[in-house]
Image: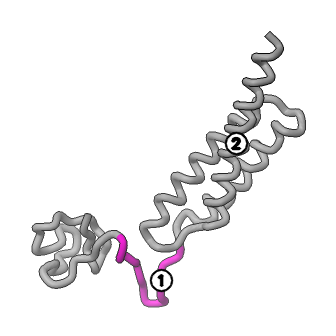
Amino acid sequence: MNYCKNCGHEVRHDDKYCSNCGQSLIHNPYKQSDQRYFDKNGPLKSKYEQTSYVLGITALIFSALNWIGFPYVHLIGLVLGFIGLYYVKKDKLTGSYSKVGNIMSIIAIVLAIASMVIGGIIASRLI
């Protein structure tokens, strides 16, 4: 995938000009891996950094509550963990994202899945 160096709009590999801003793409189309957004003050901050951080913490709390005796709340943690990862993925395009939110979302998902697996094993022994 190619992106316009000027505005970050997605462009086709055979485009000569960006359809969004009109920037010439002949000499320097940016690949997604090289893409960074800047303004006058330097790199742009992540739009969803705080959101993914809060979602990661909340998902972790809900996933952990199952381990101390609150049944089924790990499912909320699982959903929030995936939503947090969605926002982290969305922010990685700008080059700035919440690494803590990413890690917490992953831990919350692992805890929630572990709760379901262990719960399934215990339930199968009770039957």
The disc label shown at residue 43, or none = 1
Task: Report which residue position mark 2 lands on.
Answer: 77
Marks 1/2 in contact by CB < 8 Å: the verdict is no
Where, quadrant-wise, is the C terminus in this rendering?
top right
Quadrant in which residue 17 is drawn: bottom left
The number of numbered discs placed on residues in the rendered structure image is 2
Q: Secondary structure at mark 1?
A: strand
Sort mark 1 into few (<14), some (14-19) or many (20+) by Cα contacts within 10 Å.
few
Query: Which residue occupies 15% across, 84% down?
Result: 27
Query: Which residue occupies 33% across, 69% down?
Result: 32
Q: Where 40 falls versus 45 (above or below)?
A: below
* Nearer-the-camera pick, 96 or 42: 96
Query: In the rendered structure, does residue 38 fall within the stretch colored magenta?
Result: yes
Query: Which residue occupies 81% across, 29% down?
Result: 71
Q: Is residue 55 visible?
A: no
Q: Where 42 falls versus 12 (above or below)?
A: below
The disc label shown at residue 79, or none = none
**Residue located farthest toward the right when viewing the structure as drawn:** 68
Q: Position of residue 111 (x, y in %)?
A: 73, 44
Compute the Cα span from label 1 to label 2. Answer: 32 Å
Q: Is residue 90 visible?
A: yes
Quadrant in which residue 78 is drawn: top right
Residue type at mark 1 is Pro
Specify the segment rendered in magenta: 33-45
Q: Position of residue 58 (x, y in %)?
A: 73, 50
